[in-house]
Amino acid sequence: MTRNQNDKVALVGTPCQIIAAAKMDHFRDILGESPLDLKIGLFCMENFSYFYLNQLLEKHEIELKDVSECRVEKGHMWFYLTDGQVLKILLKEAKTCMRKNCSVCMDYTSELSDLSVGSVGSPEGWSTVIARSQKGLELLKKAEQDEYVQIKPINDSGIQLIEKLSSRKKTENKAEIKKRESVARPVIYRRFITDSQFRDEVVECQFADLKADVVDVGTCVLCGACEYVCPENIVKIEDRKPRIKGECPPECNLCYVACPRTYLPQELVSTDLDQKPLGDYLKIVSAKASLVKGQDGGVATALLNYALTHKMVEGVMVVDKSRAKPWKPQVKLTKNTDDVIKASGTKYAACPVFKALKVKENNKEEL
Ligand SMILES: Cc1cc2nc3c(=O)[nH]c(=O)nc-3n(C[C@H](O)[C@H](O)[C@H](O)COP(=O)(O)OP(=O)(O)OC[C@H]3O[C@@H](n4cnc5c(N)ncnc54)[C@H](O)[C@@H]3O)c2cc1C
Ligand code: SF4
Ligand code: SF4
Ligand code: SF4
């Protein structure tokens, strides 16, 4: 494939979206150059179906249009309403709206990102930041020097809490994978193979295989990577699933290669990461943005804005709220720092983020 990307883009996303971006980078000889140059990953225990979340709130006689802030903490999902009331729903009940794919997910802290950002482990109003690559560490240092973020050491108890939650996610979800595999098809992204085995294994895999191996077994994370990489433009995310609208030409396997829930080569995700609850990293700190109000410390937004303003990237992909449907996540590829600030805050629903790159490519838009 001859995709040639000149614009460098930063992506902020959940661990599964970061895995797709890392695969696109790793397999660029097959998929073409990836524009995704900086990966800011979020911590993520679970995500929710927008459709079922709406239904749950209806049951509690609340409409999403009346919600001004949403948080998951202390065993509850909290909805702060515009009239000042607060609705808290037990997480156990909210989890009935959880996406099925999240219960086989083994990554809590975005282990393949340049920088991971989460709320757990740091005091209220601060974010936990894990720098994993030199590029990420450099961005964090420069953003601190130029006073975009303040940094302080993270407490040992904070690190222990993240490790505990991550280990719990890995243990519980490994058990769920085992359970599912005893009655259904394998969860193949947990089948570790080498890079060369991967290339042999997937050579004839097309959308029908992606559907059988990922979508039909309930592991699709709805990231939109398959739609983005399809050279024929025949994959569309519709009705909460990727669907095909045409015939695949022989020898194309791009969607299968890019999907974060097909095989992951050992060269990308080492098998011992399961024994390392936080993954590999260089530095972990608590941080807070100086000028941004975000979900926690506003750090994801401040770092993206630093990268944009200092021309480390030409654009960033953020997830804002849809204008038409309250709290429905909507991806935006922008080079405007006001858009990045507007998109701060967590939207607890899946979002096909890579769609933004497809739109840009199809319109041949410059950023
Ligand atoms: C589905 C989900 C589950 C999470 N679960 C946990 C958890 O269990 N524990 C924990 O510590 N932290 C979790 N987080 C991360 C946490 O909510 C904050 O995003 C993080 O602490 C960064 O805060 P901030 O103030 O620095 O970010 P902000 O400056 O507020 O920026 C947040 C960024 O997140 C992006 N974003 C918002 N919604 C989505 C989405 N649905 N998909 C992709 N990107 C999105 C926005 O583009 C924005 O740039 C979760 C985030 C999401 C999206
Ligand atoms: S699969 Fe679910 S739990 Fe895992 S990173 Fe994606 S949204 Fe979060
Ligand atoms: S043409 Fe078919 S196999 Fe190729 S990326 Fe598109 S859907 Fe997948
Ligand atoms: S099938 Fe498509 S949308 Fe689903 S996880 Fe794979 S690449 Fe993402």
Image (cartoon, rainbow, N blue to C red):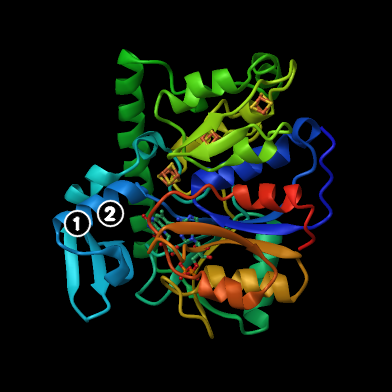
Indicate the position of residue 144 as horizontal and vertical percent values. 62, 79
> Is 259 placed above or below 94 here?
above
For the question of whether residue 48 can be seen, the reply is no
Q: Position of residue 330 (x, y in %)?
A: 51, 58
Distance from disc 2 to disc 1, alpha carbons, whole Å, reads: 6 Å
Where, quadrant-wise, is the N terminus in this rendering?
top right
| Residue 61: quadrant of the picture | bottom left
The residue indicated by pointer 1 is 58
Examine the image and state in which quarter residue 60 appears.
bottom left
Q: Are marks 2 and 1 in contact (CB under 8 Å)?
A: yes
Residue 339 percent across, percent down from the top left: 59, 73
**How many other residues sit within 10 Å of disc 2, few (<14), some (14-19) or many (≥20)?**
some
Q: Which mark is residue 54?
A: 2
Q: Quadrant of ligand 2?
A: top left
Residue in the picture at 76% in, 63% down: 367
Give 203 or 224, whichever is nearer the viewer: 224
Q: Could you say which is closer to the camera, residue 267 or residue 160?
A: 267
Q: Label 2 amino acid?
A: Asn
Give left or right: position of 160 versus 36: left
Residue at position x 71%, y 58% from top?
9
Amino acid type at circle 1 is: Glu
